[in-house]
C-alpha cells in the first residue's frame, strides 16, 4: 500500500509536499535497496521528510540518519520506534537523540517537543514515539513475547505484571507529553499532522486485513494516545487531523472520527519504501 494523500484546507491548492516513511529497518536491507529507496525519495523532491521510526536496530540509527542529512537538504522530522531502542535504554536513547539534534537546523526529533511545527499557515505537525501500552486486548493472558522485552533495558527481566505496569506508564507518558502541543496545534491550525510509531487505535492495527486480536493488540496499540487524541479533538469539530503511524507492518487507512483519519504504513522487510506523498495547503 502506498498512500497518496491530499490534506487540504477548503479549496486551497497544495503548497507543500511531504514524503512519509516508516518501519525502514535499514540494517535488514541490502545496500543497493537502501540506495534505491533514498533515490526514490530524492526523485519526489519533497519540501520535508517525515520518518516514523524503526530506522534500524539500536542506536546505529544515527548512522542512517546521517545518510538522510547528507543526501537531502530538506527539513527532516522524525520519531523513534521500538527497534531503535534495542540493546539499550528508552530513556537514555531519547536523551542522547535530543543532545545530538538539539539546535540542528534541519533535523528535528519530535518526541518531548513542546512547540508546534508550522508546515504551512494552515497545517501544523506534532509527534511522539508512542509505545504499545498493554491496554488494548488481554496483555496478562497473551502468550506473545516480543524482542522488546528481551532487548530493551526498561523491559528486561520483569514479570508479566511488572512489564504491564511499565508499558502502561510509557503509553501514558506519550499521551501526556503530546497533549499540550496537540492542543496548541488544534487551537491555531485548521489541519494537524500527528507523527507517531505505534498505532493509537486498534482499528488501524491490522494483520492480513483484520484487526489485531486479543493476544497481539496489547503489544501493538498505544491506546492511551488514541484516547487523548479523540478527547482533545471533540472540542474542535472544524479541524482535520491525520495520524501517521507504523509498527504493525500492515498498511491501513481508517476513519476513527469524521475529522480523524489514521494511516498505518506497511513494511516489506529488506525493501524500504515510501509510505505516502502528502500534498498540504
Image (spheres, rainbow, N blue to C red):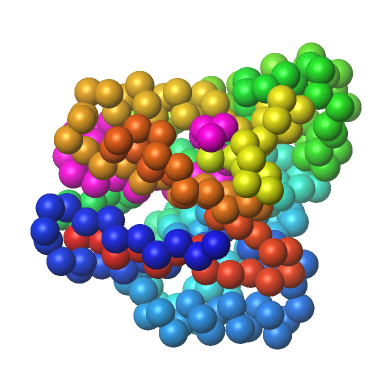
114 magenta-colored:
no
- The residue positioned 61% from the left and 83% from the top of the image is 36
The percent coordinates of residue 197 (x first, y second) are 56, 46
Q: Looking at the image, is 96 positioned above or below residue 33?
A: above
Describe residue 151's horizontal placement relative to residue 267 as left or right. Answer: right
* Magenta-tinted stretch: 182-203
Q: Answer with the quarter of the image where residue 149 lies.
A: top right
Observer-nearest residue: 161 or 100? 161
The percent coordinates of residue 83 (x first, y second) are 71, 50
The quadrant of the picture occupied by the N terminus is: bottom right
The percent coordinates of residue 27 (x first, y second) are 75, 67
- The residue positioned 37% from the left and 26% from the top of the image is 230
- The residue positioned 59% from the left and 78% from the top of the image is 37
The quadrant of the picture occupied by the C terminus is: bottom left
Residue 119 appears anywhere in the view: no
Q: Looking at the image, is 270 positioned above or below residue 142?
A: below
Total numbered circles: 0
- The residue positioned 29% from the left and 37% from the top of the image is 259
Q: Answer with the quarter of the image where residue 217 lies.
A: top right
Describe residue 52's horizontal placement relative to residue 156 as left or right. Answer: left
195 magenta-colored:
yes
Observer-nearest residue: 77 or 192? 192
Q: Looking at the image, is 252 positioned above or below residue 11?
A: above
Describe residue 61's horizontal placement relative to residue 69 as left or right. Answer: right
Q: Looking at the image, is 64 positioned above or below residue 263?
A: below
The percent coordinates of residue 92 (x first, y second) are 66, 41
Outermost residue on the left side: it is 11
Amino acid at each position: 500500500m502506498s498512500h497518496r494523500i491530499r490534506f487540504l484546507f477548503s479549496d486551497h491548492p497544495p503548497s507543500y509536499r511531504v514524503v512519509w516513511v516508516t518501519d525502514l529497518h535499514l540494517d535488514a536491507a541490502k545496500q543497493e535497496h537502501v540506495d534505491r529507496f533514498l533515490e526514490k525519495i530524492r526523485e519526489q523532491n519533497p519540501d520535508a521528510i517525515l520518518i516514523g521510526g524503526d530506522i534500524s536496530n539500536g542506536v546505529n540509527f544515527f548512522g542512517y540518519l546521517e545518510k538522510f542529512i547528507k543526501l537531502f537538504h530538506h527539513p527532516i522530522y522524525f520519531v523513534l520506534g521500538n527497534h531503535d531502542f534495542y540493546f539499550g535504554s528508552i530513556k537514555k536513547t531519547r536523551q542522547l537523540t535530543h543532545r545530538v539534534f538539539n539546535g540542528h537546523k534541519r533535523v528535528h526529533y519530535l518526541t518531548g517537543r513542546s512547540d508546534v511545527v508550522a508546515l504551512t499557515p494552515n497545517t501544523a505537525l506534532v509527534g511522539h514515539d508512542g509505545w504499545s501500552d498493554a491496554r488494548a486486548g488481554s496483555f496478562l493472558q497473551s502468550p506473545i513475547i516480543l524482542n522488546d522485552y528481551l532487548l530493551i533495558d526498561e523491559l528486561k527481566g520483569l514479570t508479566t505484571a511488572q512489564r504491564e505496569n511499565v508499558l502502561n506508564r510509557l503509553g501514558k507518558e506519550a499521551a501526556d507529553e503530546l497533549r499540550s502541543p496537540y492542543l496548541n496545534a488544534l487551537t491555531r491550525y485548521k489541519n494537524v499532522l500527528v507523527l507517531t510509531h505505534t498505532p493509537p487505535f486498534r482499528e488501524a492495527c491490522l494483520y492480513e486485513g483484520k484487526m489485531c486480536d486479543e493476544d497481539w493488540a496489547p503489544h501493538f496499540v498505544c491506546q492511551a494516545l488514541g484516547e487523548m487524541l479523540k478527547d482533545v479533538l471533540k472540542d474542535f469539530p472544524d479541524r482535520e487531523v491525520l495520524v501517521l503511524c507504523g509498527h504493525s507492518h500492515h498498511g491501513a487507512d481508517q476513519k476513527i472520527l469524521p475529522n480523524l483519519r489514521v494511516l498505518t504504513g506497511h513494511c516489506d522487510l529488506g525493501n524500504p519504501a515510501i509510505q505516502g506523498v502528502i500534498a498540504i495547503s
